Image (spheres, helix red, strand yellow):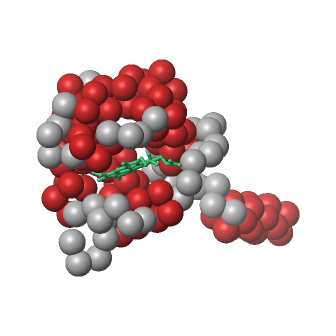
Amino acid sequence: MHPKSFRQLLSITAFSALLVAAGCTSTPPKPETSLYQRLGGIEAITAVVDDFVANVAADSRINGRFATTDIPRFKRLLVEQICAGSGGPCVYTGRDMKTTHAGMGITDAEFDALVEDLVQTLDKFKVPTAEKEELLGILGPMKADIVEPGT
Ligand code: HEM
């Protein structure tokens, strides 16, 4: 091999090593779109929250809990929370989940009832399984701050 082309080969090898080191190789593409986008953005989230809160209002297992709640504010905060939590451009301006639900004595069964009401809406809107699970995966861990220990 001619010395010059050997040097070329060396520099090509070095360059390839650099690309690998920099992560510029053809790894499978990550999903580019946020859950927020895949859910359909703020309009879809607002429609989901409207329908979900209507389900809660009709659900005798838990609707008594919301007897004195300012529903328009509750809906606005839920939209903000889901939007922000799914990677959307919102800022959640409500109270944290522990402070909000403190002293209410919310039970496991009540939490599950509320999640059921949400799933009913997500199914009605034909939200695909992946997005549904992702959203429930964001809300699920909040349970520890919402359900009172020992209930
Ligand atoms: C993942 C589940 C839940 C989420 C994401 C959630 C979220 C929220 C949010 C964002 C607020 C408004 C916060 C604020 O006032 O600053 C709120 C208030 C409230 N939540 Fe929840 N919540 C959940 C579960 C529950 C459950 C299971 C119950 C009872 C069955 C419940 C009862 C209430 C009530 C009564 C209020 C209104 C409090 C008030 O009027 O001051 N929540 N919740």
Task: Specify whether 65 is left or right of 33.
Answer: left
Percent x, y for residue 49? 38, 31
Q: How many marks?
A: 0
Could you tell me if residue 29 is visible in this image?
Answer: no
Of all residues, the one furthest to the front in this rendering is 68
Of all residues, the one furthest to the bottom in this rendering is 150
Of all residues, the one furthest to the right in this rendering is 4
Q: Nearer the viewer, residue 25 or 9?
A: 25
**Vertical placement of 48 versus 111: above or below?**
above
Q: Nearer the viewer, residue 18 or 2?
A: 18
Residue that appears at 48% across and 21% down: 43
Percent x, y for residue 92? 59, 45
Percent x, y for residue 88? 57, 38
Q: Nearer the viewer, residue 106 or 115?
A: 106
Q: Nearer the viewer, residue 20 or 95?
A: 95
Percent x, y for residue 57? 25, 33
Q: Quadrant of the N terminus?
A: bottom right
Task: Specify whether 77 is left or right of 102.
Answer: right
Task: Specify whether 19 is left or right of 61.
Answer: right
Q: Residue 52 is drawn in which quadrant?
A: top left
Q: Quadrant of the C terminus?
A: bottom left
Residue that appears at 56% across and 54% down: 95
